Image (spheres, rainbow, N blue to C red):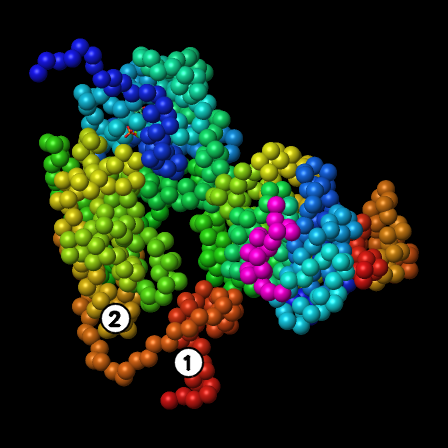
C-alpha cells in the first residue's frame, strides 16, 4: 500500500503529564514516590545489594524529613543526592529510555514518580541536589514554574538548571509551593496526616526497622513491627526460591502464619473493625511494601477455589518478598500501591500463598468446634519478629479435637443505643468490651440473679 | 440537655465564666465576619442562660432550643425568654437534620453550641460531623462535653476508647499518660479539634474549619469546650487572623477554676479591682474575711466574667 505523505501527529503534550497522569495516583502515593527516590538514594550509597530479610544493613545514618502544611510541602534527604549528569540525562525526563539498564535493586523503575508527584502537589517547584562530584561537593537546583512551562508544547522539552548553594548534607531537597487545592486541603487535615504517618510506618517498615529515619512535620515515624506467633503447635512457614522474569533473576521469600488469635465473633460492628486490621497478605518489592494487609482477589482471596476473605480468618499474616536487581522484573504497578496481577512470577507464586492461606482457613473452621482447646494453645504462642522466623516449608497449626455436639443453642440478637451499651460495658468490666461480650455477661448476670446458679 | 435536673447554674461559677468568655469571642468575630442574620441553636434547658446572652450581647433574634426530655420540653416552652425562641422536641441527632432544611434558618449563619453535660460519645460525633458538613458558611460551631477521665474507661482502656471515638486523627503513639489526670482534658480538646478540622478538610469545605475555641473549666467535674469557625472561602484569612491574635480570649491554656464565693465576697473583692499590684491574702483578710491563695488568684483572673447574681436569674 502506498504511504500518504502526511503523518498522524503522536507527540505528547505537557498537559498530559501535568494534569492527566496525576489523576490516577493518590496524593499519599505521590509522597511515597518521593520517599522511594530517597530510599533508592540511600541504598545506592550502601552499594546496592539485594534487600532480603536476613541482610543486616544499617540505615541509621540516613534521614528523610517531610514537612506538609497547607502553604508548602518539602522533603529533604541526606541520601547522596543526584548528580548533575543524572539531572541532565534522565532524572527529569518522562519515562526511562528503553535502553537504560538498572541493576541496583532500586524500587524506582518507570522514570515518572518524581515528576508526577511534584505536579500533583503544586505549581511552584524547586528541586535542589548536593552530591559528591569526584571528591568535591557540588550543588544545583531545578526550579519549575508549572504554568509557565505548560504554556508551550513545542519540543524540545526541558527545565532550566541553576547553580545553587550547598545543602547541609549530600542529598536532595524538593520544595513545592502554590499547592494544588487537593494537596492544600489534605495537609490541612489531621486525619490525612495521621493516615500518611501510618502508611509510611507500614510501607517502609523494613527500612525503618533497619534504622532509616523518616519524619513528618517534625516528628519521627517508627516502623511497624511485624510479628508472627510461634510455639510448639504454631510454626510459621518461611520459604525461599528463585524465579526468572524476562531473563532477570528474582528471589522470592514467603512467610506466613498466625499473627494474632482469630476473633471471637462475627458481629458486624467488629467486622468493620476487622477491615482495618493489619491481617491478610503483604507484598514487598525490593524492600518496599506495595500491598498491605490485602484481603482481596489480588492476593488470591475469592479466586481459584480460594474462599473470599471472611472476618473469621483474621489473625493471619502472610508476606511475600520479591527481590531483583532490575526492578522492571518485579510485579509492580506504576503507582506502587498494588501488584501487577498479570505478572508471571506473581502468578507462579500464588499457589504457594494459597497453600498457607487455606491451611489457616481450615484451622479457623476447626477451631469453632473446639474453641477452648484452641484458645489455650493460641495463648502459648509467643510473638517473634519475622526476621527471626526459621525456615520451614509449610505452616504448622495445631490439630484440634472437635467437641461432641452438646445442648442445642439459642442465638440472641438485639439492638440498644451505643451510649447505653458503653455505660453497661464499663460497669461490667471494660469500656472496650465487645458487644457480644456485654450481651453474654448481662445475660449471665440476669440469669444468676433471677434463676440462680446451676 | 437534661442539666436542669442536675444543678442550678448559679452554683457553677466556672461554667458561667467560660460562657462569658466564649460569647465575648463571638462578639469579636461579629466585628470581622459577615454574621448578619445569625441564628442561635443550642440546648436552652429551662434556664436559657446562653440564649439570653446571645440575644443581649450579640443581638441574635432567631433562636432554636433542642430538648429531648418530655417534661423538660414542656417546661422549656413555658420558660422560653423571648418570642423568637423556638423549642424543638427531640434528640439533637434527629432534630438537626430537620433544621438544616428549615426554611427560616437555612442560608443564614448559625451560632451553634452543643452544650452537653455528658461525655463525648458516638452520637455527639455524628452530630458534629453532620453540622460541619451542613452548616452554612460563616457558621460558628461550639461543643461542650464532659472531660472526666473516668467517663472514658479505666486508664489502660482510654487510648483505645479515644481511637474508637475520634478515629484516624488519634496518633498511633497516643500514650496512657496522655489520657490521665489533667492531660486527659487537653487530649480530648486536641483530638476533638483535629477531628473537626479533618471533617471540614475531607469534604473540602471551601473555607475549611478555623479552630477558635478551646477552654477547659471545672466546677465539680472537668468540662471541655471546643469549636471553631466554618468561614466562607473569602473569610478564612480574616477569621484565622482574628483568632491568632494575642488578645483572642477563647484559646485558654489553663483550666478555668473559679472560686465559689458569696455575692457579698465577690462584690467586696471586685471593688478592689482592677489594681496595680496583685490581690494579696493579707488584703482579703483586711477586708474582713479569708480565702485560699489560688481562690484569690482565680478570682482576679476572671472577675470581669464572674457571675453576678442578677445575671444568673435573668
Ligand atoms: N531523593 C533523590 N536522591 C537521589 N536521586 C534522586 C532523588 N529523587 C530523584 N532522583 C533521581 O531522579 C530520577 C527520577 O526519579 P523518578 O521518581 O521520576 O523516576 P524513577 O525513580 O527512576 O522511577 P519511578 O517512576 O519508578 O519512580 C531517579 O532515577 C534518580 O536518579
Ligand atoms: Mg522514583
Near mark 2 (Cα within 10 A), the count class, few <14, some 14-19 or many ≥20, is some
Q: Nearer the viewer, residue B1 or B13?
A: B1
In percent of width and height, residue A259 lies at 29, 56
Q: Is residue A449 above or below residue B208?
A: below
Is label 2 in a helix, a strand or a loop?
A: helix
The chain identifier of the residue carrying mark 2 reads A
In percent of width and height, residue A281 lies at 25, 50
Q: Which residues are magenta?
A: B89-107
* Placement of the N terminus of chain B among the 4 image quadrants: bottom right
Is label 1 in a helix, a strand or a loop?
A: helix
Q: Nearer the viewer, residue A309 or A195?
A: A309
Q: Is residue B117 above or below residue A10?
A: below
Q: Does the magenta-highlighted stretch encompass residue B180?
A: no
- Number of residue marks: 2
Quadrant in the rendering for residue A62: top left
Quadrant in the rendering for residue A78: top left
The chain identifier of the residue carrying mark 1 reads A
Q: Under 8 Å from ligand 1: the CB of mark 2?
A: no
Using the numbered discs, state the Cα–Cα distance from disc 1 to disc 2 in whole angstroms.
Answer: 22 Å
The reply to whether dot 1 and dot 2 touch (C-beta < 8 Å) is no
Q: If the picture is divided into quarters, which one holds ligand 1?
A: top left
Which residue, given by chain and number where applicable, does mark 2 sit on?
Answer: A368
Point out which mark residue A444 bears.
Answer: 1
Residue at image x 68%, y 38%?
B33
Residue at image x 13%, y 35%?
A245
In percent of width and height, residue A406 lies at 25, 82
In percent of width and height, residue A178 lies at 49, 26
- Judge if badges 1 and 2 mark residues of a common chain: yes
Q: Could you tell me if residue A73 is visible in this image?
A: no
Report the side of A184 relative to A10 (left or right).
Answer: right
* Placement of the C terminus of chain B among the 4 image quadrants: bottom right
Residue at image x 33%, y 79%?
A410
Amino acid at each position: 500500500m502506498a504511504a500518504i505523505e502526511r503523518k498522524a501527529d503522536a507527540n505528547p503534550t505537557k498537559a498530559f503529564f501535568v494534569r492527566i497522569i496525576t489523576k490516577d495516583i493518590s496524593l499519599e502515593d505521590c509522597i511515597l514516590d518521593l520517599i522511594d527516590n530517597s530510599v533508592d538514594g540511600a541504598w545506592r550509597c550502601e552499594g546496592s545489594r539485594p534487600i532480603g530479610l536476613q541482610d543486616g544493613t544499617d540505615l541509621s545514618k540516613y534521614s528523610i524529613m517531610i514537612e506538609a502544611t497547607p502553604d508548602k510541602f518539602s522533603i529533604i534527604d541526606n541520601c547522596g543526592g543526584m548528580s548533575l549528569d543524572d539531572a541532565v540525562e534522565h532524572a527529569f525526563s518522562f519515562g526511562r529510555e528503553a535502553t537504560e539498564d538498572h541493576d541496583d535493586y532500586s524500587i524506582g523503575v518507570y522514570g515518572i514518580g518524581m515528576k508526577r508527584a511534584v505536579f500533583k502537589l503544586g505549581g511552584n517547584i524547586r528541586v535542589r541536589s548536593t552530591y559528591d562530584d569526584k571528591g568535591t561537593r557540588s550543588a544545583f537546583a531545578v526550579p519549575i514554574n508549572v504554568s509557565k512551562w505548560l504554556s508551550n508544547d513545542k519540543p524540545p522539552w526541558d527545565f532550566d538548571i541553576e547553580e545553587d548553594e550547598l545543602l547541609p548534607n549530600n542529598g536532595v531537597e524538593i520544595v513545592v509551593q502554590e499547592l494544588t487545592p487537593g494537596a492544600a486541603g489534605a495537609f490541612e487535615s489531621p486525619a490525612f496526616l495521621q493516615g500518611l504517618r501510618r502508611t509510611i510506618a507500614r510501607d517502609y517498615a523494613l527500612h525503618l526497622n533497619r534504622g532509616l529515619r523518616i519524619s513528618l512535620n517534625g516528628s519521627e515515624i517508627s516502623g511497624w513491627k511485624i510479628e508472627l506467633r510461634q510455639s510448639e503447635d504454631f510454626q510459621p512457614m518461611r520459604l525461599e526460591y528463585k524465579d526468572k522474569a524476562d531473563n532477570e533473576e528474582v528471589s522470592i521469600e514467603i512467610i506466613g502464619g498466625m499473627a494474632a488469635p482469630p476473633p471471637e465473633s462475627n458481629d458486624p460492628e467488629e467486622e468493620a473493625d476487622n477491615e482495618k486490621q493489619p491481617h491478610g497478605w503483604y507484598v514487598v518489592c525490593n524492600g518496599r511494601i506495595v500491598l498491605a494487609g490485602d484481603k482481596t482477589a489480588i492476593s488470591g482471596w475469592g479466586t481459584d477455589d480460594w474462599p473470599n476473605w471472611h472476618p473469621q480468618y483474621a489473625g493471619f499474616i502472610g508476606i511475600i518478598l520479591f527481590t531483583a536487581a532490575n526492578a522492571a522484573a518485579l510485579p509492580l504497578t506504576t503507582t506502587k500501591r498494588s501488584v501487577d496481577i498479570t505478572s508471571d512470577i506473581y502468578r507462579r507464586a500464588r499457589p504457594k500463598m494459597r497453600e498457607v492461606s487455606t491451611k489457616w482457613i481450615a484451622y479457623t473452621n476447626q477451631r469453632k468446634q473446639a474453641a477452648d482447646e484452641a484458645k489455650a494453645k493460641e495463648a502459648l504462642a509467643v510473638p517473634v519478629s519475622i526476621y527471626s522466623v526459621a525456615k520451614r516449608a509449610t505452616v504448622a497449626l495445631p490439630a484440634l479435637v472437635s467437641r461432641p455436639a452438646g445442648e442445642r443453642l439459642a442465638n440472641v440478637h438485639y439492638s440498644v443505643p451505643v451510649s447505653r451499651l458503653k455505660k453497661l460495658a464499663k460497669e461490667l468490666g471494660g469500656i472496650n468490651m465487645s458487644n457480644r461480650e456485654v450481651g453474654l455477661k448481662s445475660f449471665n448476670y440476669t440469669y444468676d440473679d433471677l434463676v440462680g446458679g446451676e | 440537655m437534661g442539666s436542669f435536673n442536675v444543678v442550678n447554674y448559679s452554683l457553677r461559677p466556672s461554667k458561667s465564666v467560660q460562657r462569658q468568655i466564649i460569647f465575648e469571642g463571638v462578639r469579636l468575630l461579629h466585628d470581622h465576619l459577615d454574621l448578619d442574620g445569625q441564628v442561635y441553636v443550642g440546648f436552652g434547658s429551662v434556664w436559657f442562660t446562653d440564649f439570653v446572652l446571645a440575644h443581649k450581647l450579640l443581638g441574635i433574634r432567631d433562636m432554636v432550643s433542642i430538648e429531648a426530655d418530655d417534661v423538660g420540653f414542656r417546661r422549656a416552652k413555658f420558660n422560653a425568654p423571648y418570642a423568637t425562641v423556638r423549642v424543638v422536641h427531640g434528640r439533637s441527632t434527629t432534630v438537626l437534620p430537620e433544621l438544616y432544611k428549615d426554611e427560616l434558618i437555612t442560608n443564614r449563619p448559625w451560632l451553634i453550641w452543643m452544650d452537653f453535660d455528658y461525655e463525648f460519645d458516638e452520637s455527639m460525633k455524628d452530630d458534629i460531623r453532620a453540622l460541619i458538613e451542613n452548616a452554612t458558611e460563616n457558621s460558628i460551631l461550639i461543643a461542650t462535653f464532659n472531660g472526666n477521665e473516668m467517663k472514658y474507661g479505666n486508664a489502660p482502656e482510654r487510648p483505645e476508647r479515644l481511637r474508637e471515638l475520634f478515629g484516624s486523627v488519634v496518633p498511633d503513639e497516643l500514650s496512657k499518660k496522655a489520657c490521665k489526670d489533667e492531660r486527659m482534658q487537653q487530649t480530648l480538646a486536641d483530638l476533638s479539634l483535629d477531628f473537626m478540622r479533618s471533617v471540614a478538610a475531607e469534604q473540602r469545605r471551601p473555607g475549611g474549619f478555623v479552630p477558635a475555641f478551646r477552654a477547659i473549666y471545672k466546677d465539680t467535674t472537668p468540662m471541655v469546650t471546643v469549636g471553631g469557625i466554618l468561614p466562607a472561602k473569602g473569610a478564612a484569612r480574616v477569621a484565622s487572623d482574628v483568632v491568632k491574635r494575642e488578645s483572642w480570649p477563647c484559646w485558654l491554656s489553663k483550666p478555668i477554676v473559679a472560686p465559689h464565693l458569696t455575692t457579698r465576697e465577690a462584690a467586696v473583692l471586685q471593688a478592689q479591682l482592677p489594681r496595680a499590684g496583685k490581690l494579696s491574702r493579707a488584703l482579703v483578710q483586711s477586708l474582713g474575711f479569708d480565702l485560699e491563695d489560688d481562690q484569690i488568684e482565680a478570682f482576679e483572673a476572671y472577675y470581669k466574667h464572674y457571675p453576678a447574681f442578677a445575671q444568673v436569674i435573668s
